[in-house]
Image (cartoon, rainbow, N blue to C red):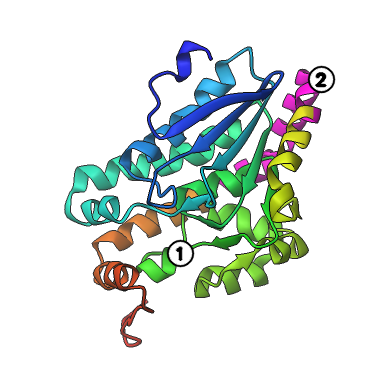
Protein backbone atom coordinates (compact mmCIF):
# COMPACT_ATOMS: atom_id res chain seq x y z
CA UNK A 1 0.00 0.00 0.00
CA UNK A 2 1.44 3.37 -0.99
CA UNK A 3 1.74 6.01 1.73
CA UNK A 4 -0.78 8.30 0.03
CA UNK A 5 -3.66 6.16 1.47
CA UNK A 6 -2.38 5.76 5.03
CA UNK A 7 -4.25 8.66 6.64
CA UNK A 8 -7.75 7.67 5.51
CA UNK A 9 -10.13 6.65 8.31
CA UNK A 10 -13.45 5.71 6.70
CA UNK A 11 -12.07 4.37 3.43
CA UNK A 12 -10.17 1.07 3.49
CA UNK A 13 -7.93 -0.17 0.71
CA UNK A 14 -6.65 -3.39 -0.75
CA UNK A 15 -5.22 -4.65 -4.04
CA UNK A 16 -7.33 -7.64 -5.19
CA UNK A 17 -5.57 -7.83 -8.57
CA UNK A 18 -2.56 -6.32 -10.30
CA UNK A 19 -2.94 -2.54 -10.63
CA UNK A 20 -6.51 -2.69 -9.27
CA UNK A 21 -7.16 -0.61 -6.14
CA UNK A 22 -10.30 -1.55 -4.18
CA UNK A 23 -11.81 1.18 -2.01
CA UNK A 24 -14.23 0.09 0.72
CA UNK A 25 -16.46 2.60 2.49
CA UNK A 26 -16.70 1.61 6.15
CA UNK A 27 -18.73 3.19 8.92
CA UNK A 28 -19.55 0.29 11.28
CA UNK A 29 -23.06 0.09 12.67
CA UNK A 30 -24.34 2.88 10.41
CA UNK A 31 -24.66 1.12 7.05
CA UNK A 32 -21.57 3.03 5.87
CA UNK A 33 -23.36 6.37 6.16
CA UNK A 34 -21.24 9.32 5.08
CA UNK A 35 -20.30 11.31 8.18
CA UNK A 36 -18.10 14.40 7.99
CA UNK A 37 -14.93 12.31 7.79
CA UNK A 38 -16.13 10.00 5.03
CA UNK A 39 -17.67 12.84 3.05
CA UNK A 40 -14.34 14.62 2.92
CA UNK A 41 -12.47 11.42 2.09
CA UNK A 42 -14.81 10.62 -0.80
CA UNK A 43 -13.84 13.98 -2.25
CA UNK A 44 -10.06 13.60 -2.14
CA UNK A 45 -9.68 9.89 -2.92
CA UNK A 46 -10.23 10.52 -6.64
CA UNK A 47 -7.40 13.03 -6.79
CA UNK A 48 -5.08 10.57 -5.03
CA UNK A 49 -6.11 7.77 -7.38
CA UNK A 50 -5.64 9.99 -10.40
CA UNK A 51 -2.08 10.81 -9.31
CA UNK A 52 -1.11 7.22 -8.40
CA UNK A 53 0.97 5.57 -11.15
CA UNK A 54 0.37 2.14 -9.58
CA UNK A 55 -3.40 2.29 -10.23
CA UNK A 56 -4.96 1.39 -13.58
CA UNK A 57 -8.51 0.75 -12.32
CA UNK A 58 -10.54 1.28 -9.14
CA UNK A 59 -13.39 -0.57 -7.44
CA UNK A 60 -15.62 1.30 -4.98
CA UNK A 61 -17.83 -0.76 -2.63
CA UNK A 62 -19.29 -0.71 0.88
CA UNK A 63 -18.30 -2.85 3.84
CA UNK A 64 -20.64 -5.65 4.87
CA UNK A 65 -24.11 -5.91 3.34
CA UNK A 66 -24.60 -2.21 2.52
CA UNK A 67 -23.10 0.09 -0.08
CA UNK A 68 -23.97 3.41 1.52
CA UNK A 69 -26.58 4.35 4.13
CA UNK A 70 -26.86 7.97 3.03
CA UNK A 71 -25.77 11.12 4.79
CA UNK A 72 -25.07 10.85 8.52
CA UNK A 73 -27.98 12.53 10.32
CA UNK A 74 -25.69 14.22 12.83
CA UNK A 75 -23.89 15.89 9.93
CA UNK A 76 -27.19 16.94 8.35
CA UNK A 77 -28.35 18.51 11.65
CA UNK A 78 -25.08 20.39 11.93
CA UNK A 79 -25.59 21.70 8.40
CA UNK A 80 -28.95 23.18 9.43
CA UNK A 81 -27.39 24.93 12.42
CA UNK A 82 -23.93 26.02 11.33
CA UNK A 83 -23.26 28.04 8.19
CA UNK A 84 -19.59 27.07 8.05
CA UNK A 85 -20.48 23.37 8.01
CA UNK A 86 -23.13 23.97 5.35
CA UNK A 87 -20.75 25.79 3.03
CA UNK A 88 -17.99 23.23 3.57
CA UNK A 89 -20.27 20.32 2.70
CA UNK A 90 -21.66 22.26 -0.28
CA UNK A 91 -18.15 22.65 -1.69
CA UNK A 92 -17.35 19.00 -0.96
CA UNK A 93 -20.52 17.85 -2.74
CA UNK A 94 -19.50 19.83 -5.81
CA UNK A 95 -15.90 18.63 -5.72
CA UNK A 96 -16.96 15.01 -5.23
CA UNK A 97 -18.86 15.05 -8.52
CA UNK A 98 -16.19 16.86 -10.51
CA UNK A 99 -13.28 14.89 -9.04
CA UNK A 100 -14.99 11.64 -10.01
CA UNK A 101 -15.79 12.87 -13.51
CA UNK A 102 -12.25 14.16 -14.03
CA UNK A 103 -10.41 11.15 -12.56
CA UNK A 104 -8.50 9.61 -15.46
CA UNK A 105 -8.62 6.06 -14.07
CA UNK A 106 -11.71 3.93 -14.84
CA UNK A 107 -13.92 3.34 -11.80
CA UNK A 108 -16.13 0.30 -11.17
CA UNK A 109 -18.83 0.38 -8.47
CA UNK A 110 -20.21 -2.68 -6.70
CA UNK A 111 -23.51 -1.75 -5.03
CA UNK A 112 -25.12 -4.12 -2.53
CA UNK A 113 -27.96 -3.41 -0.12
CA UNK A 114 -28.94 0.24 0.32
CA UNK A 115 -27.16 2.74 -1.93
CA UNK A 116 -28.02 6.26 -0.80
CA UNK A 117 -26.37 9.66 -0.32
CA UNK A 118 -22.74 10.53 -1.01
CA UNK A 119 -21.90 6.90 -1.64
CA UNK A 120 -24.56 6.77 -4.35
CA UNK A 121 -22.77 9.63 -6.13
CA UNK A 122 -19.75 7.35 -6.54
CA UNK A 123 -21.95 4.38 -7.35
CA UNK A 124 -23.78 6.02 -10.25
CA UNK A 125 -20.95 8.20 -11.56
CA UNK A 126 -18.64 5.19 -11.76
CA UNK A 127 -17.67 4.36 -15.34
CA UNK A 128 -19.04 0.83 -14.93
CA UNK A 129 -21.80 0.68 -12.31
CA UNK A 130 -22.78 -2.77 -11.08
CA UNK A 131 -25.46 -3.61 -8.52
CA UNK A 132 -26.83 -6.76 -6.96
CA UNK A 133 -30.35 -7.54 -8.15
CA UNK A 134 -31.72 -6.86 -4.67
CA UNK A 135 -29.81 -3.61 -4.11
CA UNK A 136 -31.94 -0.59 -3.14
CA UNK A 137 -30.89 2.59 -4.92
CA UNK A 138 -32.60 5.62 -3.38
CA UNK A 139 -32.13 9.34 -3.85
CA UNK A 140 -33.49 10.58 -0.55
CA UNK A 141 -33.24 14.34 -1.02
CA UNK A 142 -36.93 15.21 -1.29
CA UNK A 143 -37.84 13.02 1.68
CA UNK A 144 -35.31 14.98 3.72
CA UNK A 145 -36.98 18.20 2.60
CA UNK A 146 -34.41 19.52 0.12
CA UNK A 147 -34.18 19.58 -3.66
CA UNK A 148 -32.63 16.60 -5.42
CA UNK A 149 -29.31 18.18 -6.26
CA UNK A 150 -25.89 16.58 -5.90
CA UNK A 151 -25.26 14.27 -8.85
CA UNK A 152 -28.94 13.56 -9.47
CA UNK A 153 -29.87 16.45 -11.75
CA UNK A 154 -27.10 15.72 -14.25
CA UNK A 155 -26.78 11.95 -14.28
CA UNK A 156 -30.26 10.48 -13.68
CA UNK A 157 -31.95 12.12 -16.72
CA UNK A 158 -28.94 11.30 -18.89
CA UNK A 159 -28.90 7.64 -17.84
CA UNK A 160 -32.57 6.67 -17.58
CA UNK A 161 -34.46 9.55 -19.22
CA UNK A 162 -36.31 12.53 -17.82
CA UNK A 163 -39.63 10.78 -17.16
CA UNK A 164 -38.08 8.02 -15.03
CA UNK A 165 -35.74 10.50 -13.33
CA UNK A 166 -38.69 12.67 -12.29
CA UNK A 167 -40.61 9.67 -10.97
CA UNK A 168 -37.82 8.38 -8.76
CA UNK A 169 -36.39 11.73 -7.67
CA UNK A 170 -39.72 13.36 -6.82
CA UNK A 171 -41.11 10.34 -4.96
CA UNK A 172 -37.91 8.93 -3.45
CA UNK A 173 -39.00 5.50 -4.65
CA UNK A 174 -36.35 2.79 -4.24
CA UNK A 175 -34.94 1.25 -7.42
CA UNK A 176 -33.84 -2.37 -7.27
CA UNK A 177 -30.63 -3.35 -9.01
CA UNK A 178 -32.67 -5.34 -11.53
CA UNK A 179 -34.94 -2.38 -12.33
CA UNK A 180 -31.97 0.01 -12.42
CA UNK A 181 -30.36 -2.11 -15.13
CA UNK A 182 -33.64 -2.35 -17.06
CA UNK A 183 -34.09 1.44 -17.23
CA UNK A 184 -30.42 2.14 -17.92
CA UNK A 185 -29.56 3.75 -14.58
CA UNK A 186 -26.65 1.32 -14.07
CA UNK A 187 -24.41 -0.69 -16.37
CA UNK A 188 -25.48 -4.16 -15.20
CA UNK A 189 -26.81 -6.17 -12.28
CA UNK A 190 -25.80 -9.55 -10.90
CA UNK A 191 -26.92 -12.14 -8.42
CA UNK A 192 -25.98 -10.91 -4.93
CA UNK A 193 -23.35 -13.59 -4.36
CA UNK A 194 -21.70 -12.80 -7.71
CA UNK A 195 -21.44 -9.03 -7.29
CA UNK A 196 -17.91 -8.68 -5.91
CA UNK A 197 -16.39 -11.20 -8.33
CA UNK A 198 -18.08 -9.52 -11.31
CA UNK A 199 -16.79 -6.10 -10.26
CA UNK A 200 -13.30 -7.54 -9.90
CA UNK A 201 -13.51 -9.25 -13.29
CA UNK A 202 -14.48 -5.98 -14.97
CA UNK A 203 -11.75 -4.07 -13.11
CA UNK A 204 -9.14 -6.64 -14.17
CA UNK A 205 -10.09 -6.18 -17.81
CA UNK A 206 -9.89 -2.40 -17.48
CA UNK A 207 -6.54 -2.58 -15.70
CA UNK A 208 -5.14 -4.74 -18.52
CA UNK A 209 -6.28 -2.31 -21.22
CA UNK A 210 -4.44 0.62 -22.74
CA UNK A 211 -4.32 3.35 -20.05
CA UNK A 212 -4.15 6.10 -22.65
CA UNK A 213 -7.02 4.75 -24.75
CA UNK A 214 -9.26 4.26 -21.71
CA UNK A 215 -8.35 7.65 -20.23
CA UNK A 216 -9.22 9.62 -23.34
CA UNK A 217 -12.34 7.59 -24.10
CA UNK A 218 -13.55 8.30 -20.58
CA UNK A 219 -12.64 11.98 -20.95
CA UNK A 220 -14.62 12.28 -24.19
CA UNK A 221 -17.69 10.46 -22.86
CA UNK A 222 -17.74 12.49 -19.64
CA UNK A 223 -18.07 15.67 -21.67
CA UNK A 224 -21.79 14.81 -21.64
CA UNK A 225 -21.65 15.34 -17.88
CA UNK A 226 -19.43 18.44 -18.10
CA UNK A 227 -21.91 20.08 -20.47
CA UNK A 228 -24.51 19.78 -17.73
CA UNK A 229 -22.31 21.84 -15.38
CA UNK A 230 -24.67 24.86 -15.24
CA UNK A 231 -27.61 22.53 -14.45
CA UNK A 232 -25.59 20.81 -11.74
CA UNK A 233 -24.46 24.07 -10.14
CA UNK A 234 -28.02 25.40 -10.08
CA UNK A 235 -29.45 22.17 -8.64
CA UNK A 236 -26.77 22.06 -5.97
CA UNK A 237 -27.52 25.65 -4.96
CA UNK A 238 -31.24 24.85 -4.74
CA UNK A 239 -30.53 21.77 -2.64
CA UNK A 240 -28.39 23.58 -0.11
CA UNK A 241 -30.74 26.55 0.10
CA UNK A 242 -33.30 24.03 1.36
CA UNK A 243 -31.25 23.32 4.49
CA UNK A 244 -32.41 26.69 5.78
CA UNK A 245 -36.05 25.88 5.00
CA UNK A 246 -38.83 24.62 7.28
CA UNK A 247 -39.08 21.11 5.83
CA UNK A 248 -35.66 19.81 6.85
CA UNK A 249 -36.49 19.45 10.55
CA UNK A 250 -39.60 17.47 9.67
CA UNK A 251 -37.54 15.38 7.25
CA UNK A 252 -34.93 14.65 9.92
CA UNK A 253 -37.63 13.67 12.41
CA UNK A 254 -39.29 11.34 9.91
CA UNK A 255 -35.99 9.62 9.12
CA UNK A 256 -35.17 9.20 12.81
CA UNK A 257 -38.63 7.74 13.48
CA UNK A 258 -38.72 5.75 10.21
CA UNK A 259 -42.03 7.22 9.15
CA UNK A 260 -43.15 9.16 6.04
CA UNK A 261 -42.61 12.93 6.37
CA UNK A 262 -45.68 15.10 6.83
CA UNK A 263 -44.85 18.12 4.69
CA UNK A 264 -47.49 20.82 4.45
CA UNK A 265 -49.05 20.52 0.96
CA UNK A 266 -49.87 24.24 1.13
CA UNK A 267 -46.19 25.17 1.32
CA UNK A 268 -45.14 27.36 -1.61
CA UNK A 269 -42.71 25.91 -4.15
The residue closer to the viewer here, 147 or 37, is: 37
Determine whether 5 is above or below 116 in the image. Answer: above
Magenta segment's dominant SS is helix
First reached walking from the N terminus: tag 1 or tag 2: 1
Determine which residue is flagged by label 2.
Answer: 210
| Marks 1,2: beta carbons within 8 A | no
The span picked out in magenta is: 205-230
Circle 1 residue: 140
Q: CA distance from mark 1 to mark 2?
A: 38 Å
Left/right placement of residue 242 relative to residue 234 reads left
Q: Position of residue 148 (x, y in %)?
A: 46, 62
Q: Is residue 208 magenta?
A: yes
Compared with residue 48, is residue 124 higher up or lower down, i.e. above or below?
below
Which of these two is toward me, 235 or 108? Answer: 108
Q: Is residue 150 visible?
A: no
Percent position (x, y) of residue 32?
44, 47
243 versus 142 height, above or below: above
The residue sitting at 30% across, 73% down in the picture is 257
At which x and y percent is residue 9? 37, 30
- Residue extending farthest left: 81
Residue at disc 1, secondary structure? loop
User: At x 34% / y 52%, what residue is drawn?
Assistant: 72
Q: Position of residue 115 (x, y in %)?
A: 54, 55
Quadrant where the C terminus sits is: bottom left
Amino acid sequence: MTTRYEDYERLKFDWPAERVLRVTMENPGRLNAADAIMHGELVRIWRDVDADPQVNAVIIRGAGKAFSGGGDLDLVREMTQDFETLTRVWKEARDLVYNLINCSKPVVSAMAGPAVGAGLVAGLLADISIAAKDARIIDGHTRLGVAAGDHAAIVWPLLCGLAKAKYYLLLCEPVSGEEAERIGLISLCTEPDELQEKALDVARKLAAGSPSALRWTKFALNNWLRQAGPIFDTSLALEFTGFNGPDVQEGLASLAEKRPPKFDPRSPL
